[in-house]
């Protein structure tokens, strides 16, 4: 789809959302470890376990979406090539058709091993949510020259290892554009400006079903939480 059509990608953590996204024709559905925050109530993604990912991947996979169903390898599940492959195989056994992990050159041995095991790999560069505690927050990447160079080198390394696409999260828009123009595989942006090959959002941010936190770059298209509250109030009064 690179260069031909913008790639609209969204997250799903369960059967109904995966089914809805499939009915709309979303070509890339991600069971993201963002489920830790927006479904499980953790403060960030670092507490999500393999067992929790498998549980949600199984639910989303039951929708049998026609688009690609990718799943996140959670925090510390890909520290070595061996654990990366073993845990990727667990996600595939649960129904994922591709896996995503955060990082570039720092995890390149793991990426090569996953791809050598015939598992399609989706990269993730820029702000890496699994490193939020070490980094002390969520910060735009690529504003300074060493970060721009690192992003370009990491993207190139992921392409050479065989990644089929790369998520760019909170990357300075001009750098996201440069990465997009430099590499042959699609970039999927989130908070990284309009010039990526596609865009991904956490679906609950788009729909307003998790109203307690909305990232600055998201314009919700629905205030579902308000509508849900109103419907529940109305029912409560009616009984
Ligand atoms: O976990 C997630 O939902 C992600 C985003 C890029 C959407 O990784």
Image (cartoon, rainbow, N blue to C red):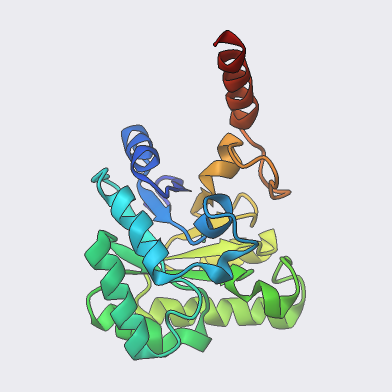
* Place of residue 26 in the rendered image (x, y in percent of width and height, measured from the top left): 38, 42
Q: Is residue 27 above or below residue 117?
A: above
Q: Can residue 222 be seen at all in this image of the molecule? A: no
Q: Quadrant of residue 98?
A: bottom left
Q: How many marks?
A: 0
Q: Quadrant of the C terminus?
A: top right
* Place of residue 25 in the rendered image (x, y in percent of width and height, measured from the top left): 34, 37
Q: Can residue 36 be seen at all in this image of the molecule? A: yes
Q: Quadrant of residue 81?
A: bottom left
166 with respect to 204 (left or right): left
Q: Residue at x 30, y 82 (%)?
A: 85
In front here: 188 or 84?
84
* Place of residue 90 in the rendered image (x, y in percent of width and height, measured from the top left): 28, 71
Tell which residue pokes out farthest to the front in this image.
239
Q: Residue at x 23, y 46 (%)?
A: 64
178 with respect to 7 (left or right): right
Tell which residue pokes out farthest to the top in this image.
238
Q: Quadrant of residue 136?
A: bottom right
In front here: 139 or 209?
209
Q: Residue at x 61, y 36 (%)?
A: 208
* Place of residue 150 in the rendered image (x, y in percent of width and height, measured from the top left): 62, 82
48 with respect to 195 (left or right): left
């Amino acid at each position: 789809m690179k260069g031909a059509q913008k790639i609209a990608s969204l997250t799903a953590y369960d059967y109904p959302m995966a089914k809805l996204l499939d009915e709309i024709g979303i070509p890339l559905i991600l069971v993201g470890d963002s489920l830790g925050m927006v479904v499980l109530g953790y403060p960030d993604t670092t507490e999500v376990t393999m067992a929790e990912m498998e549980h949600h991947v199984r639910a989303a996979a039951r929708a049998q979406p026609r688009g690609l169903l990718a799943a996140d390898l959670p925090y510390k599940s890909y520290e070595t090539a061996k654990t990366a492959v073993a845990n990727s195989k667990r996600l595939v056994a649960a129904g994922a058709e591709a896996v995503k992990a955060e990082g570039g050159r720092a995890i390149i041995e793991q990426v090569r091993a996953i791809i050598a095991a015939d598992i399609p790999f989706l990269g993730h560069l820029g702000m890496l949510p699994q490193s939020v505690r070490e980094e002390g927050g969520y910060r735009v990447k690529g504003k300074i020259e060493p970060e721009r160079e690192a992003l370009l080198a990491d993207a190139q390394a992921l392409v050479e290892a065989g990644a089929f696409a790369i998520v760019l999260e909170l990357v300075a828009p001009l750098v996201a554009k440069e990465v997009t123009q430099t590499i042959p595989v699609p970039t999927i942006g989130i908070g990284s400006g309009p010039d990526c090959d596609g865009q991904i959002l956490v679906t609950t941010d788009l729909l307003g079903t998790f109203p307690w936190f909305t990232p600055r770059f998201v314009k919700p298209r629905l205030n579902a939480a308000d509508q849900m509250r109103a419907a529940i109030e109305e029912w409560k009064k009616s009984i």
